[in-house]
């Protein structure tokens, strides 16, 4: 009957997985919250301006989920610039630690949070020795060094060589 035929037709298409994808030039990653697209941009900007550039792309400054993502970000920056340097990644100092250096309450894993609403956990926080130190009580943003893969807390008014944007993959 027509009803059986319609059921078989719809069941066949329901079983076909729909692939998530990224825009051209963006790299796809799988995260616990689903597909995530990232792109490295080379431009010397303060953190706020880098975030504005990401928002214009329908994205936000991306956090670092794991070593695989870090390696890709670093490679992208160095292949585009032919040098090493820092890039903005999506982390901010938590409010209770705004005026604090490293303490028991404000440790290497509790001083910062990921701002992109996709990165989870603390695996991506790979700090330089003695960091995050919150020098001068105003290092509230996060940068990643391309040649070492290590992070440093820095003033949001500093400039970096580039930044990484991230956004949810689409169907």
Image: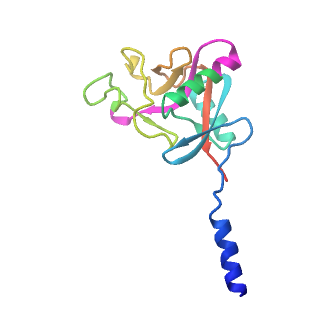
Q: Quadrant of the N terminus?
A: bottom right
Whether the magenta-drawn stretch holds residue 81 is answered as yes
Does residue 117 lie above or below 96 as drawn? below
Q: Is residue 11 above or below residue 84?
A: below
The residue positioned farthest toward the top in the image shown: 83
Q: Residue furthest left?
A: 104
Residue at point 67%, 83% (across, down): 4
Verify whether residue 114 appears in magenta.
Answer: no
Rendered location of residue 68, percent (x, y): 53, 29
The one of 41 and 160 positioned closer to us in this rendering = 41
Colour treatment of the image: rainbow
Relative to residue 56, is residue 77 depicted above or below?
above
Residue 163 placement (x, y as % from top left): 61, 27
Give the camera-side residue of 137 and 141: 141
Residue 130 lies left or right of residue 34; in this view the side is left
Residue sitting at the far bottom: 1
Q: Residue at x 67, y 68 (%)?
A: 12
Relative to 35, 135 lies left or right? left
**Which residue is located at x 67 percent, y 53 percent?**
171
Where is residue 60? Give x, y as percent: 59, 39
Residue 10, placed above or below residue 22: below
Using the rendered view, name the quadrant where residue 128 is placed.
Answer: top left
Total labels: the figure holds 0
Which region of the structure is painted magenta? Answer: 77-96
Q: Position of residue 30 (x, y in %)?
A: 55, 42
Q: Quadrant of residue 28?
A: top right
């Amino acid at each position: 009957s027509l009803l059986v035929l319609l059921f078989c037709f719809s069941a066949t298409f329901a079983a076909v997985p729909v692939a998530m994808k990224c825009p051209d030039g963006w790299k796809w990653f799988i995260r616990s919250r689903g597909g995530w697209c990232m792109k490295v941009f080379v431009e010397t900007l303060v953190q706020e301006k880098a975030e504005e550039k990401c928002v214009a792309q329908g994205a936000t400054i991306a956090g670092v989920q794991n070593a695989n993502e870090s390696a890709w970000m670093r490679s992208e920056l160095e292949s585009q610039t032919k040098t090493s340097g820092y890039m903005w990644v999506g982390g901010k100092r938590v409010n209770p630690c705004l005026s604090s250096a490293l303490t028991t309450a404000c440790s290497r894993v509790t001083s910062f949070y990921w701002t992109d609403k996709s990165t989870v956990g603390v695996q991506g926080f790979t700090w330089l020795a003695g960091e995050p130190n919150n020098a001068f009580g105003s290092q509230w943003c996060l940068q990643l060094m391309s040649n070492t893969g290590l992070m440093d807390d820095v003033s949001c008014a500093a400039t970096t060589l580039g930044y990484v944007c991230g956004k949810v993959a689409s169907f």
